[in-house]
Image (cartoon, grey):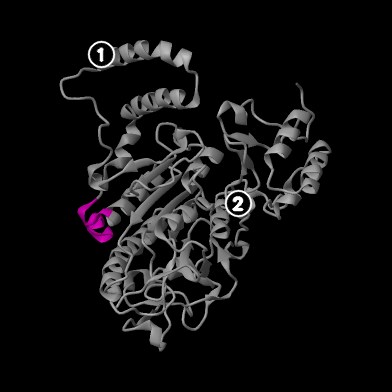
Amino acid sequence: MATSPGRWSTPMNSASSNEPLTVARTGTTMTSARRSAKALDSWSRREVLALGAKALFGVGLLPMLGGRAFADEPAAARSTAKNVIYLYMAGGMSHLDTFDTKPGAAVQGPVTSLASSADGIQVSEYLPKVSKQMHHLAVIRSMNSNQGAHEPGQYFMHTSYAMRGTIRHPAMGAWVSHLSGRRNATLPANVAIGAGGQHAGAGYLESKHAPLPLGNPADGLQNSARPDGVTAKRFDRRLDLVDQFDASFRKQYDQKQVRAYKDLYDEAVQLMGSKDLAAFDISQESSDLRDAYGENPFGQGCLLARRLVEHDVRFIEVTLGGWDTHDDNFDRVSTQAGILDQALGTLLPDLDSRGLLEETLVVVATEFGRSPQINGNTGRDHHPKSFTCLLGGGGVRGGRVHGSSDVNGSDVATDKVSIPDFNATIGYALGLPLDKIVISPSGRPFTLADHGRPLLGLFA
C-alpha cells in the first residue's frame, strides 16, 4: 500500500515474523499506526489515541516521548563522534578512591588527592597519568542506579533496561550497529574485548549486531586463516559443499536465526580475505607504545581498540574486572586503578595525536560505586545511590564536572544522572535517533535509552 509523505511507515517485517520492527519517522499506513498503538500497551488509552491521531496528521510521536528527540538541532551540528571506545570497570569502581575524592573526610581513608590538568578537578593519587589528561574528560559525579547487584547492575548499565526473564535487551554496541550500521564493510561494527559470558549482546536484535568477542588482545583474531595445507581452491570447495548441504534446510526454515547462521559464515569468509584483518594485530605497534599502554590484557585491549577505531569499527568495549572490593579495598583499588591509569592515560593522548579524539567518544563506566563506610574487612560494599562515570572526546567538552555527590559521597547532591540519561548522552554524541522505536518480537516498543535524556551541557 502506498504511503503519504510525512506520515509513519514500517519495514515489511513485523512482530509476528519474529523480527524486531523498527518504526521510522518516514510515513505510515493505518495498519502500521494501529500496530504501533497496540504494541504500546503500557501507555494510557488517551496516549495511544493521541499517537494514532498524530501519526495520521504527520505530527509524529516525538512530543509523547518526553522530549527525547532534538529535531531542531541537526546531528552534524551537535555531535562529532563516529566511534566509541567503551571502557567498562566490572565489579563496581569505587568513586571515592578514583574520580570523586573527598579530601579531609573520614570516609576517604588513606587515599590522597592530586590536582589535574583541569582547573578545580582533583583525582585520586592512584591516577597520576590520567590526572594529566583530565582536560579531555568530563566527570559525571552524580550517577545513580536502582540496581545494587552485579549482574542486574551491569545489564542495566549496558542496556538502559532492568533485567526481565521474558526478554533480552540489546547492549549499547548492538544499538549502534543496528541504528547506524558499519563504516567498514569487512569488519564488524561491534567488538567486545574481555567482556565475559554475561554480556547482553544483541538482545532481541538480529545476531549480526552482537559484539565480536575477543579474549586476549595479543592473540589477535583467532581462526581467521585457512588451516595449514588447505589451498584456496580446496577451501572454496568445502564451502560449496557446506552450502549445498544446508540449502534445503534454509529453504524449509526461512527464519531469522537460520539466515543469521549463513550470514555469519559469509562475513567470516569475507573477513579472512580482507586487508583490514591487520587491524587485530597489535604486534605491528612499537614495543615502546605497547609498554606505555601496559603489558596486561586491559592495556593491550585499549591499544587494540585504538587500532580498530583507525579501521572504522564503530563500537569497541574493553573490560577491566576486579573492582568488587569488599575486602582490602585500598590495596586492590590501587592495583586496578594503576592498570586503568596507564591505559587511559596513554589512550587519550594517543588518539589526540592521531587526530582521532574528536571523532571517538571515550567512555569509562561501571555498574555502581562503593560505600563511603569502610567495613570490617577494610573494604567497601556495593553503592548504587551515587557513583562516577566519565566521557571524553567525541564532541564532549573536557575539563568539567557534571553534578556532585554529598560531602561523604553517599548520595547525589546535585543534577542526578540516571543510567538511561548516561546512555542517551552516548547516543546523542553519535547522532543516533533517540526517539526511534523498535518493536521487539514479543510486540513491545523500545528505544535506545528508554526515557533517558542526554546531558546537552557536556557538548561544545
Kindly identify the amino acid type of the residue bearing the numbered disc 2. Asp
Q: Which mark is residue 190?
A: none
Q: Which mark is residue 233?
A: 1
Who is closer to the viewer here, 372 or 279?
A: 372
Q: Residue at x 58, y 36 (%)?
A: 442
Q: Which image quarter: residue 331? A: bottom left
Locate the N terminus and report the quarter of the image it occupies.
top right
Disc with the residue nearer the chain's start (1 vs 2): 1
Q: In the image, 198: left or right of 425?
A: left
* Magenta-colored stretch includes residue 161: no
Who is closer to the viewer here, 352 or 318?
A: 318
Residue 384 vertical placement versus 201 (above, below): below
Residue 334: where, in percent of width, then height? 28, 72
Residue 322: where, in percent of width, then height? 30, 62
Residue 177: where, in percent of width, then height? 50, 40
Q: Which residues are magenta?
A: 286-297
The residue that mark 2 highlights is 450
Q: Nearer the viewer, mark 1 or mark 2?
A: 2
Q: Which image quarter: residue 260? A: top left
Q: In the image, 83: left or right of 78?
A: left
Who is closer to the viewer here, 73 or 252?
A: 252
